[in-house]
Image: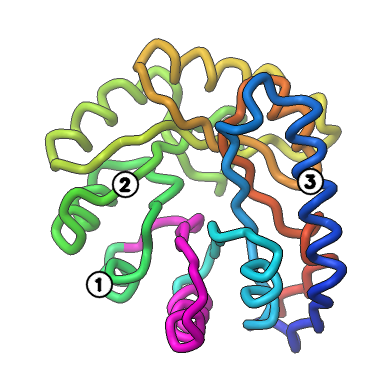
Amino acid sequence: MISEPPTVDPAAVTGRVARVRAVIDAISADPSAVRLVGVTKGFGADAVRAAAAAGVEDLGENYADELVAKAAIAADEGLSVRWHYLGAVQRNKVPRLAPVVAWWQGLGRIEEGAAIAARAPGATVLVQVDIGGLPGRGGCRPEAVPDLVGRLRAEELVVAGLMAVGPPGPPEASRSGFRSVAALADRLDLPVRSMGMSDDLEVALAEGSTMVRIGRALFGPRPPRR
């Protein structure tokens, strides 16, 4: 459960989006190839409206209930949103998510892919690479990624690229992991590298990210879960 979502100021979000895009333009080798995903986890529907008003059409959620509820509101209001599911894929929640999720980020096991393929044939997925070996982070060890990519493709899923979550600590601690993910994506001929959040955005862009998942830097501090 989360506490009452904070109010989101649309004008503030528009300004923050501009600042994030300026960072992308300044650091990325190919700014036009970088997709900005606004992470509305913990915020209410006003964050969805503010993001859409600021031109951010890709939005991400970690929790199935939040995503489904916000997707319904966005559809009712005619907002143009592509939903990214960022949380661990639980097979019992796939049937509810499948009609509204455009991008499934964070796949680490073939069982997850099979569940998605059964409900959303041809869905677009990203394989999460475990770059830190930390418990509870999910993902697939780098040496197992090529096999998982092949097995997901055999399920007729579209494997667009790789995704990684940087380790806790200073942003520089993410650099070597992001660099290894970009190199692995190159070897597998995968164009998408979903790397970088509010704290390590600059490092991720410098190491070749083509998709950044930004929450706090767009919407402000997230309320604690309780």
Circle on res. 124: 2
SS class, disc 2 = strand
Identify residue for label 1.
95
Q: Is residue 98 shown left or right of residue 20?
A: left
Q: Is residue 93 above or below residue 36?
A: below
Which label lies toward us, 1 or 3?
3
Does residue 20 show up?
yes
Labels 1 & 3 near each other (Cβ < 8 A) = no
- Which is more N-terminal, label 2 or label 1? 1
* Displayed quadrant of residue 126: top left
Range shown magenta: 65-90
Circle on res. 201: none
Circle on res. 20: 3
Q: In whole angstroms, how far apart are the C-alphas of marks 1 and 2? A: 16 Å
Specify the amino acid type for callout 1: Pro
Q: In whole angstroms, how far apart are the C-alphas of marks 3 and 2? A: 25 Å
- Name which residue lies at 51% across and 76% down: 79
- Name which residue lies at 31% across and 76% down: 96
Q: Is residue 7 shown left or right of residue 80?
A: right
